[in-house]
């Protein structure tokens, strides 16, 4: 019982221990440190950009994007090459055997 | 220089006005931050951040509150952000300790000694500050502003953007919770003195 009373008294003492507390004072040359920090913040914009780019997630995403663009370019080049080969194969016999039919206009428009 | 003049000068980017702002309110900002984060180096860091933020956002300050109220708000917000960052680091430190590479100080932080406490009350105050870390955030802020900064309930209400009644309730609950925590702490000691 006495112990419980003692504990309550200790808790009350602890609660009142900050009565009359004095304000803690800031460390000297605060203004100088603030100015230095402000200058550092503006200087480090490029550093921040570099840091952002070099983050593994960003670097990996960038790499994936480059690979994706390359793959897209290769695929589109291949498909256009195939189309031109197909055009060439149909064009070749046409040229070879002269499938074009001469119309009546070709004979009528002969110049003297 | 009165407050509206100081605000006008600050908004024009006057260097002397900024020096005055820092000179007049640095201890208030530092003491508030110290009461919340309970670490002198962190409080110093926060104090710098508060004045940089004040400098950068003075253009949006309309003068509807006192400069001190505005600075208190920035300080509380910065200190709480800082605590959240630190907690995240602590969790990471705990994981690191499980892997065998943790820093012991991050997991078992040292008890805080406020420099403004009288010498004979230092030990008790240390236990109170330790208990303060375990009560809800709003109660802790209200208690810190009232007890450490000596702000009236009305001023605390303005800083916390709440009603006088809410502040009375917060401080009442803070005291009750602190007492509970302290009783729990002294109850675990074999020979409490």
Image: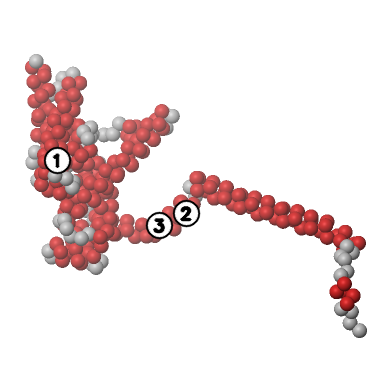
Give me the disc on residue B155. none
Mark whose residue sits in front, 1 or 3: 1
Give the SS element for disc 1: helix
**Residue that carries the numbered disc 3 in the rendered image:** A44
Q: Position of residue B175 (x, y in %)?
A: 13, 33
User: Is the residue B157 above or below the residue A50 in the image?
Assistant: above
Q: CA distance from mark 2 to mark 3?
A: 10 Å
**Residue that carries the numbered disc 2 in the rendered image:** A50
- Bin the neighbour count of mark 3 within 10 Å (Cα to Cα): few under 14, some 14-19, many 20 and up: few
Q: Position of residue B172 (x, y in %)?
A: 12, 35
Q: Are marks 1 and 3 on the same chain?
A: no
Q: Position of residue B36 (x, y in %)?
A: 22, 41
Residue sticking out furthest to the top: A1
In this rendering, position of residue B73 left or right of residue A68: left
Is residue B124 visible in this depiction of the protein?
no
What is the chain identity of the residue bearing mark 3? A
Give me the disc on residue B166. 1
Which residue is nearer to you in this view: B119 or A94?
A: A94
In this rendering, position of residue B81 left or right of residue A20: right
Q: Position of residue A44 (x, y in %)?
A: 40, 57
Q: CA distance from mark 1 to mark 2?
A: 47 Å
Give the SS element for disc 3: loop
Is residue B152 visible in this depiction of the protein?
yes
What is the chain identity of the residue bearing mark 1? B
Residue under the point 9% across and 29% down:
A12
User: Is the residue A7 above or below the residue A54 in the image?
Assistant: above
Give the SS element for disc 2: helix
């Amino acid at each position: 019982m006495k112990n419980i009373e003692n504990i309550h008294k200790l808790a009350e003492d602890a609660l009142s221990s900050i009565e009359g507390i004095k304000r803690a004072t800031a460390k000297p040359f605060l203004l100088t440190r603030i100015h230095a920090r402000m200058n550092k913040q503006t200087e480090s914009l490029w550093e921040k950009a570099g840091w952002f780019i070099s983050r593994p997630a960003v670097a990996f995403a960038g790499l994936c994007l480059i690979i994706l663009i390359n793959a897209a370019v290769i695929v589109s080049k291949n498909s256009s090459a195939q189309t031109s080969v197909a055009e060439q194969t149909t064009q070749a016999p046409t040229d070879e055997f002269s499938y074009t039919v001469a119309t009546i206009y070709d004979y009528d428009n002969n110049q003297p | 220089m009165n407050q509206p003049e100081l605000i006008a000068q600050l908004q024009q980017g006057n260097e002397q006005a900024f020096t005055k702002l820092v000179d007049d309110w640095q201890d208030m900002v530092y003491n508030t931050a110290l009461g919340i984060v309970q670490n002198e180096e962190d409080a110093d860091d926060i104090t710098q951040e508060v004045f940089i933020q004040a400098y950068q956002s003075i253009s949006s300050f309309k003068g509807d509150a006192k400069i001190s109220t505005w600075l208190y708000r920035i300080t509380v917000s910065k200190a709480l952000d800082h605590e959240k960052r630190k907690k995240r680091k602590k969790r990471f430190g705990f994981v690191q300790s499980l892997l065998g590479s943790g820093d012991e100080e991050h997991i078992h932080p040292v008890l805080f000694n406020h420099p403004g406490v009288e010498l004979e009350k230092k030990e008790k105050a240390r236990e109170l500050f330790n208990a303060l870390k375990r009560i809800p955030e709003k109660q802790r802020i209200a208690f810190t502003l009232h007890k450490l900064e000596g702000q009236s309930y009305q001023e605390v209400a303005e800083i916390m953007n709440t009603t006088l009644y809410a502040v009375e309730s917060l401080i009442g609950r803070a005291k009750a919770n602190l007492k509970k925590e302290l009783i729990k702490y002294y109850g675990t000691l074999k020979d409490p003195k």
